[in-house]
Amino acid sequence: MARRPNKKKWEDLSPRRRATVIAVGAAQLALKVVAWRDLAKRPREQVKGPKAAWFVATLVNPGGPILYYVFGRRRTTTIAPTHR
């Protein structure tokens, strides 16, 4: 398989681009972990669709965790008490 001419190696990237790639990757991983934790703790009745499907969607799709938080969760009707 031939390499695409515009595809750069890690060594070819500037330090700023490397930092950007690392920051975006870390943010993406953090979103996935938070979504997986929410999926694990949330009752099945509060998730729209199968929990396993949302887990796979967050695993495969980079935007999966955001889609889960926007479309996958049912709104709860209970309000948590405020602590003072």
Image: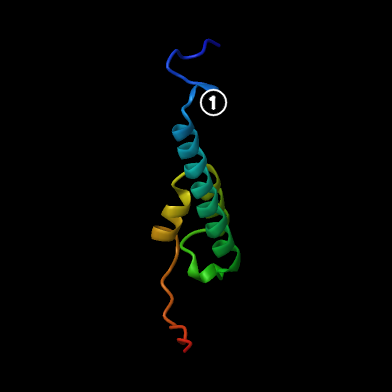
Left or right: residue 51 compared with residue 80: right
Please name whichever residue, 69 or 46, is drawn nearer the observer in this view of the structure: 69
Residue 58: tell me if it is visible. Answer: yes
Residue in view at x 52 percent, y 40 percent: 22
Seen as rendered, the residue at the extreme front is 15
Amino acid carrying label 1: it is Trp
Local secondary structure at mark 1: helix
x and y percentages locating residue 27 in the rendered image: 49, 49
x and y percentages locating residue 39 in the rendered image: 56, 62
x and y percentages locating residue 63 in the rendered image: 44, 47
Q: How is the image coloured?
A: rainbow
Classify 10 Å Cα crowding around label 1: few (below 14), some (14-19), many (20 and above): few
The residue singled out by tag 1 in the image is 10
Up the image or down, 8 lies above or below 46; here it is above
Residue in view at x 55 percent, y 68 percent: 44
Residue in view at x 49 percent, y 44 percent: 23
Quarter-wise, where is residue 72 in the image?
Answer: bottom left
Up the image or down, 80 lies above or below 71; here it is below
Please name whichever residue, 57 or 49, is drawn nearer the observer in this view of the structure: 57
Residue in view at x 54 percent, y 23 percent: 11
Seen as rendered, the residue at the extreme top is 2
Quadrant of the rendering where the N terminus is positioned? top right
Please name whichever residue, 21 or 31, is drawn nearer the observer in this view of the structure: 21
Up the image or down, 13 lies above or below 29; here it is above
Number of on-image labels: 1
x and y percentages locating residue 30 in the rendered image: 54, 53
Residue 61: tell me if it is visible. Answer: no
Up the image or down, 51 lies above or below 59; here it is below
Seen as rendered, the residue at the extreme bottom is 84
